[in-house]
Image: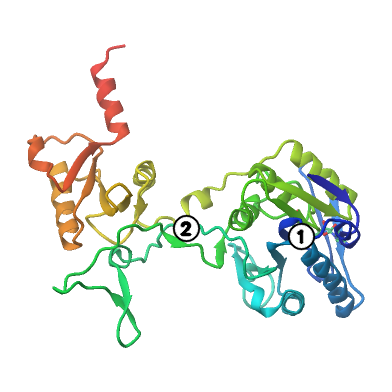
Amino acid sequence: MAIFLGDALEVVSKLESNSVQVIYLDPPFFSQKRHTLSSKEGKTYDFDDHWNSLSDYTNFMTDRIVECKRVLKDSGTIFLHCDTSAAHHLRLILDNVFGTENFRSEIIWHYKRWSNSKKGLLNAHQTIYFYSKTNKYKFNKIYTDYSATTNLDQITQKRTRKDNNKSGYLQDNDGNVVLDTQKNGVPLSDVWDIPYLNPKAKERTGYPTQKPIHLLKQIINISTDEGDTVLDPFCGSGTSMVAAKLMGREYIGVDISSDAIEITNRRLLHPIESNSELLKKGIDGYKNIDPTKLSLLNYFHAKPIYRNKGLDGFINDSINNKLMGIKIQNNDESIVESFDKFNRALSKKNISTGLLVQTHDDDLKFDFDDITSEKITLIKSPDFILQEVMNRKIY
Ligand SMILES: C[S@@+](CC[C@H](N)C(=O)[O-])C[C@H]1O[C@@H](n2cnc3c(N)ncnc32)[C@H](O)[C@@H]1O
């Protein structure tokens, strides 16, 4: 683990060949600007991104990208962060150095912005080019929640290619739909909604163009395992280094600015990561599932679904290798009403088992046996159990 003050080319050219698992580069973007920002303590940081010509810039980048390829392991990958200033030129350089066959993805980092003084479309993304050194590259698949518009059938029913080569739902010989057994969620796409660091974010250092740790964690997560080495030849305030450290990876960082190296070393001593409410809640704002429900679904390791009245999500029942529905009793529902809705939803979707979570007592008395069946298991929410315990106790 090392942080070097110096030029990226000089330092990287001294590293051993085939030694690094992933390289993240966030170089100057050819913005033709000096980037300046101040820390909360009032210290001003800056770095210069002026170039005499475009070819000066592309030559500079080509030399460094070639060296990066040399130090990558055969299973290694590279993520080059850029924006519209020179993205199209950088993509050609990467194609030349790594080969078009090793292009993996163009990741769009999308963030919300509210103001735009210039005429035209609001600029709300940056680009990260993802290439591998060979086709035998390390890649960890990660899954995200289903979107608010996903239909339950899309999740539970097995799909197949029909004779006309169109995708459709698989049916058995009797024409019944065939249910899928296990679902992990939606594989991470190439559009990443991650909030920009807000001015008050705890992790903000005051270094210009600092990226969020969450963004770097996502890259490190898909491209490395614990113990692998992450190299960042333009590490700036050291975001990738902090993310690597937090995730148990080895790290090598380089920057030509002594301020940047000083901040990086300081951050590595006391890594701080901000908590983003926006990230926690998700960009869709969990359209119609309230936060209490959502935390209960998380508690039961359930995947939330959004468009089905009688169902709130489902659980991967790995013991019986099938999907189990889950419903949380609504505040305005009696448990009997809740049960009826859930029962109907499960039958309609051919789901054979479900978990009904009771959240409160209702005035109506019911026979427990009436609302529990082989199909549906009734369980009390932890809050509800706690309330019952407290009601029984006299302190
Ligand atoms: C876009 S910033 C990196 C920001 C960083 N990702 C972060 O989260 O703070 C680009 C960095 O490249 C550095 N830099 C510019 N020319 C360099 C060179 N030849 N070698 C190494 N670093 C260089 C600048 O000092 C600056 O810190």
Task: Determine the residue positioned at 79% across, 61% down.
Answer: 71
Identify the residue at image location x=90%, y=49%: 258
x%, y% of residue 143? 47, 58
147 relative position to 269: left or right: left
Q: Quadrant of residue 133?
A: bottom right
In-image side of 256 versus 96 (left or right): right
74 vs 233, nearest the viewer: 74
Residue 323's spot in the image, x, y percent?
A: 28, 54
Question: The N terminus is located in which quarter?
Answer: top right
Q: Position of residue 154 (x, y in %)?
A: 32, 67
Circle 2 residue: 143
The disc placed on residue 41 is none
- Structural distance between the alpha carbons of marks 2 and 1: 29 Å
89 vs 338: above or below: below
Q: Residue at x 84, y 50 (%)?
A: 260
What residue is rendered at 68% in x and 47% in y?
244
Location of residue 33 (image quadrant)? bottom right
Q: Tell me if 283 is positioned left or right of 93 in this view.
A: left
Among all residues in the image, which is located at the extreme top? 395
Please rate how many residues cluster around mark 1, counting C-alpha atoms within 10 Å: few if below 14, some from 14 to 19, many from 20: some
Q: The residue tagged with tag 1: helix, strand or loop?
A: loop
Quadrant where ligand 1 appears: bottom right
Q: Quick one: SS at disc 2?
A: strand
Image x and y of residue 18, in percent: 76, 60
Quadrant containing the C terminus in the rendered view: top left
Circle 1 residue: 18
- Any part of residue 42 in sight: no
Residue type, numbered disc 2? Tyr
Question: Relative to the observer, which residue lies in front, 149 or 218?
Answer: 218
Residue 330 versus residue 59: which sits nearer the camera? 59
Quarter of the rendering containing residue 163: bottom left
